[in-house]
Image: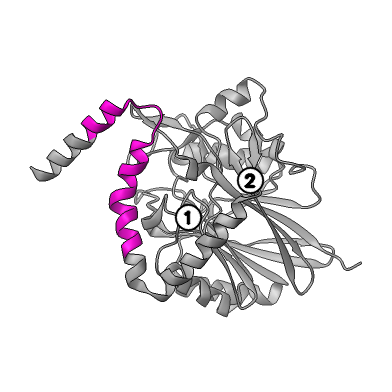
Amino acid sequence: MPQTLKIAFLGDIGLNGKYIKLYQEGIDPFAAITGLKDRDGHIIGNLECMAKGDQGENLLKKPRITTTVDTLGFLKKIGVTAVSLAQNHIYDHLEDGFEKTVHFLDQHGISRLGAGWNKDEAGRPLIIQENGIKVGLLNYVTEDTNPALPADAKVCLNFFNEEKALQDIALLRPRVDHLVLLLHWGGRVEGGMFPDYDQPFIAHRLIDAGADLIIGHHAHTFQPYEKYKGKYIFYSLGNFCFSDFEFEGRQIYLPKRRKITGLVDITFSKTDYKIKLNFYYNVLTHFKSLPNYHFKVKLRNIVFKYFVKYFFIWRIYFFFKSNMLPVYLFFIRPDIPFRHKLSRIIKSFLRRLS
């Protein structure tokens, strides 16, 4: 039997809000993910939350995501072996929050990439080697996701610059059998069901340069995926776990689309890899398997091809996503009475007219 190396890729991990209370109460909301911790292989997710520090918060960033060092213990319960840190909430709790978070990761043997105390550390690739197979990973965040790092921040992010990414790929490619890019991108389409118009073209150029697999984050929704020249591109895996939370007196409510996640299992051989994709609906205290969601994603993939081919179709979608979708999502919120919703919409409309 040929030797293999297995890696499971998770979406955005936000151990915030109600997860803090669940951890304090000893409730494991991840127990229902069949065999996740016990599977033979590595588990990599995008850690979107920093532990609360003692020195304040980054007031330039809104909203801010908060967890505690104790609640990061869920990473061990899940079985996470590595996290990507090139994301837009890395500085929510300043240097102190970052230090507390990376100290926890290092203390518990969880590898990290994408951010650090200097540019070299932030840009350093992670290489996983097992059974004679080497998989190299690079992690980037785009400026349009709004990390809001102040000029004097001592934390460094590995910002995406295509020219630099192509150079990084050229340097890493000869050292590994497979090269994976973890991209925190698509700031304009956060919450949308499709990537930004330029993302497919960028992804294709990165594959052409030598990348074998692209795993995307930040949209907080599962977006289309494609196979290009035999290589898979996942534009966004959605939220693996994220809680509703309160920020500055306002309740941030996550619609259902932000509670559906794709879990991608990759089995790497020396020269190729195979994928297995499963979908789950996260209801906070447990995960519900969604075997029929594959059909919805296939339809989404078909529509996505027309978006890439015809710019004007994508523009229609983007107008709807930017102007009409927020109103729709607001109206379907179950926690606000209808009369209050209507009143707020009318007031907002009148403010725009004045």
* Residue in view at x 34 percent, y 54 percent: 321
Residue 11 shows in the view: no
Farthest residue to the left: give it.
354
Q: Quadrant of the N terminus?
A: bottom right
The part of the chain drawn in magenta is 316-344
The picture places residue 118, in percent across and down from the top left corner, at 50, 55
Number of numbered tags placed on the structure image: 2
Judged left or right of residue 211, residue 34 is right
Q: Nearer the viewer, residue 42 or 121?
A: 42
Residue 247 shows in the view: yes
The picture places residue 242, in percent across and down from the top left corner, at 52, 38
* Residue in view at x 65 percent, y 75 percent: 230
Mark number, residue 157:
1
Q: Secondary structure at mark 2?
A: loop
Magenta span: chief secondary structure: helix
The picture places residue 274, in percent across and down from the top left corner, at 73, 65
Q: Would you call the spot at circle 1 few (<14 residues within 10 Å), some (14-19), or many (20 or more)?
A: many
Q: Which numbered disc, 2 or 1, marks the residue that appears first in the sequence? A: 1
Mark number, residue 33:
none
Q: Nearer the viewer, residue 337 or 43?
A: 337
Q: Is residue 338 above or below residue 296?
A: above
Q: Which residue is mark 2?
A: 290
Q: Quadrant of the C terminus?
A: top left
* Residue in view at x 74 percent, y 72 percent: 272
Q: Does 168 lie within the magenta span?
A: no
Judged left or right of residue 326, residue 235 is right
* Residue in view at x 43 percent, y 40 percent: 92
